[in-house]
Amino acid sequence: MTLTADIKKLERNYVPADFTLTDWNALEPYFKELVERPINSRHDLEKWLKDMSEMEAVVSEDACWRQIKMTCDTTDKSLEESFNFFCMQIQPKLQPYADLLNRKLVENPFTKELDQQQYFTYLRSVRKSIELFREENISIQAELSVMAQQFGQISGQMTVEVKGQEYTLQQASKFLEDHDRSLREEVYRKIQERRKQDKDALNDLYTQLIQKRHQVAVNAGFANYRDYKFVEMGRFDYTKEDCFQFHEAVKLHVMPLVKKINEKKKQKLGVDTLRPWDTEAEPEGVEPLNPFKTSEELTEKAIRCFEELNPFFADCLRKMKELGHLDLESRKGKAPGGYNCPLAESGAPFIFMNAAGQMHDVTTMVHEGGHAIHSFLSHPLPLSSFKEYPMEIAEVASMAMELFSMDYWTVFFDNEADLQRAKEHQLERTITIFPWIATIDKFQHWVYENPNHSVDERTGKWMEILEEFSTQTVDFTGLEEYRKIGWQRQLHLFEVPFYYIEYGIAQLGAIGMWKQFKTNKEQALQNYINALSLGGTKTLPALYEAAGLQFDLSPDHIRSLMDFVNEEYAKIS
């Protein structure tokens, strides 16, 4: 297969080239025709599937652009209204048609003649959607889509003043790397106080989301939203018990390494106790890493870094830059976080992030760049549904790229010492992210198993789980009120419930890929490309196998991977 980033927008054969989605009346005739069309042969069926895929791509891309534009500027009411219009006026009317089309597919006698290997995961997903569909959930799901976006609107307005200048919270976090400990503490407290101002609004929003999500689950015949969501997310290859096993393995095999990292930081800084405003700081006389100054510089350096790794990877970023599919810098009114949004029709995705000139931003850029490469590699697949890959492999694409690219970060750093510090920072993050993943995941299990809890009960449970995954090496004395709302900064809880354990599973996969890379770079990159090119056409274990990985959440497997990372970390720290 010849890799090219010269991606072309899909040619329309069913929907007119000049069609744009304005309202339901313009859209409905196409869905009606697909539902009513006779299918009298395998050829008819394959043509019907292609037309349906084209329609799905048109609608999906329209919805994505509405969300992208709104997150880039949460202050523009017209963008919010455009997104809400889709959620409330288009999506609810689409769902009954989607169900009719799903049933038409599985009930058609010619479906048995399709290549069962290629179509297995797609048909499994279709049957799952039929099983979950309930007419009474349509309006609730529309409300949930709108409500979830309120998190970005609330968070996007959060700013603090430092040294007489206004900063977003992402920009202000740069001061947490400063030598001046009193400045670090001042900024830390300002950020936390600003979050505290909206704690009740975010608590109320989360309570409403939990209640509505629980209702969706009950309507679909499930005891709780967790059980419903596991089916909806297509978690066919692991169970809630596997998640609990993962939590325990983190305590056993990761927490001791986190403790060691924190003790080393304390020693390096020469402080009696390590406080939360110390964890990102450098000792006196060591300048914080300054990998870039502007978003343009970040883009150019990321392209050069990817060029060293594989020219195709660099071409993907160049194409996105050429199309204007990058919005990287932090600013007031922009939603928090970062994402890569696949665009089903255009093919070249959109990267959104909040860069402020920190090392963390380099990691985010290469992370989202890994997702973007996944979008490019899966775009040639013939049906939109084939490109819907599991998040557990999607995050391998991004997290492996963080580790693959480390040796090529010379473009960001002029000297070897800074490069070593950057690698050390990355490997520390590779280890320390596991307890936070386990904390957020375990919290979600409890939240949805106990949907009628009070805010006080939720806070109590959060603190209990947080303590479970704390090493006691960071001193939070007097900061309990801030810790109680620590979960509110996690976008996933509000916008994409239960999407978080994937980061832990994928980090294991990424470490496995990096292990291959250290032994045979070319083979590892080929395995990476092979797996990502499959999109969602294989099961999760088969996608891992294509990448040369084991899909294994056992404590023994986790221990062996953590031993490897710890050895690599010891070499550079």
Image (cartoon, rainbow, N blue to C red):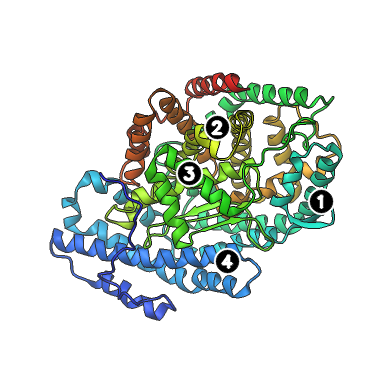
Of the image marks 2 and 3, the number of the one nearer the N terminus:
2
Of the image marks 4 and 3, the number of the one nearer the N terminus:
4
Relative image position of residue 56 (x, y in whole percent): 35, 64
Relative image position of residue 249 (x, y in whole percent): 56, 25
Quarter of the image holding residue 148? bottom right
- Foreground label between 1 and 3: 3
Of the image marks 1 and 2, the number of the one nearer the N terminus:
1
The residue labelled by disc 1 is 193
Of the image marks 4 and 1, the number of the one nearer the N terminus:
4
**Helix, strand or loop status at disc 3:** helix
Instruction: Decide if residue 386 is in sight here.
Output: yes
Of the image marks 4 and 2, the number of the one nearer the N terminus:
4
Numbered tag placed on residue 304 in the rendering: 3
Crowd rating for badge 4 (residues with CA inside 10 Å; few <14, some 14–19, many 20+): many
Tell me the kind of residue under disc 3.
Answer: Arg
Q: CA distance from mark 2 to mark 3?
A: 41 Å
Q: CA distance from mark 4 to mark 3?
A: 30 Å
Q: Is residue 406 above or below residue 93?
A: above
The residue labelled by disc 4 is 70
Q: Which quadrant of the rendered structure holds the C terminus?
A: top right
The residue labelled by disc 2 is 244
Tell me the kind of residue under disc 1.
Answer: Glu
- Foreground label between 4 and 3: 3
**Helix, strand or loop status at disc 1:** helix
- Foreground label between 4 and 2: 4
Q: CA distance from mark 1 to mark 2?
A: 33 Å
Relative image position of residue 182 (x, y in whole percent): 86, 39
Q: Is residue 555 above or below residue 484?
A: above
Seen at 66% across and 26% down, the residue is: 258
Tell me the kind of residue under disc 4.
Answer: Met
Tell me the kind of residue under disc 2.
Answer: Phe
